[in-house]
Image (cartoon, rainbow, N blue to C red):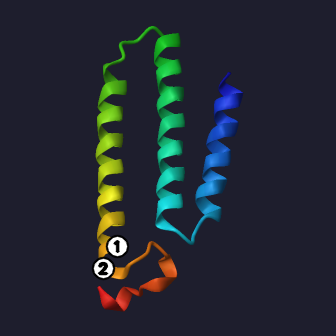
Amino acid sequence: MYIFFMLMFLFSCLTFISSRKHLLCTLLSLEFMVLILFSIMLLYLSFMSFEGYFSMFFLSFCVCEGVLGLSILVSMIRTHGNDYFQSFSVLQC
């Protein structure tokens, strides 16, 4: 079971590294990585018979991270018209 989750995490890391054109694709791969880490942590905590309170803290921080990513995506689309990384430069900021 752990090997399956580790393979999923490695594939999500490869997807994050390979998708550099769109911000939405990178945000989706980051959310998939967070979901896999949450699953691994929940499985580990239940296997060691610990309480699941830490998983709720982790989940709330992940939601905050997702909201920040989406707000950056919306502000990029409003200012530049698309979510390509090549359409804007750092000098404009």
Instruction: Give the side of residue 37 with respect to residue 8, left or right.
Output: left
Labels 1 & 2 near each other (Cβ < 8 A): yes
* Above or below 36: residue 32: below
Q: Which element type, helix, strand or loop, lies under badge 2?
A: helix
Instruction: Give the side of residue 10 with respect to residue 24, left or right.
Output: right
Q: In the picture, which quadrant includes the C terminus?
A: bottom left
* Disc 1 crowd, CA 10 A, few/some/many (<14, 14-19, 20+): some
Which residue is at 32% across, 90% downward?
Answer: 92
Q: Position of residue 22 (x, y in %)?
A: 52, 68
The residue tagged 1 is: 76
Q: In 3D space, how far apart are the residues under numbered discs 1 and 2 (Cα atoms)?
A: 5 Å
Which residue is at 66% across, 25% downward?
Answer: 2
Instruction: Give the side of residue 44 with respect to residue 6, left or right.
Output: left
The residue tagged 2 is: 79
The label number, if any, that marks residue 27 in the structure image: none
Q: Nearer the viewer, residue 71 or 81?
A: 81
Q: Nearer the viewer, residue 35 or 53?
A: 35
Residue 57, image quadrant:
top left
Residue lying farthest to the top in this orientation: 49
Q: Position of residue 87 (x, y in %)?
A: 46, 84
Q: Nearer the viewer, residue 74 or 45?
A: 74
Which residue is at 45% across, 8% downward?
Answer: 49
* Above or below 20: residue 8: above
Q: Position of residue 81 (x, y in %)?
A: 38, 78
Amino acid type for the residue under numbered disc 2: Thr
Residue 77, image quadrant:
bottom left
Residue 18, image quadrant:
bottom right
Q: Nearer the viewer, residue 73 or 52?
A: 73
Q: Position of residue 29 (x, y in %)?
A: 54, 51
Q: In the picture, which quadrant includes the N terminus?
A: top right
Q: Which element type, helix, strand or loop, lies under badge 1?
A: helix
Which residue is at 29% across, 70% downward?
Answer: 75
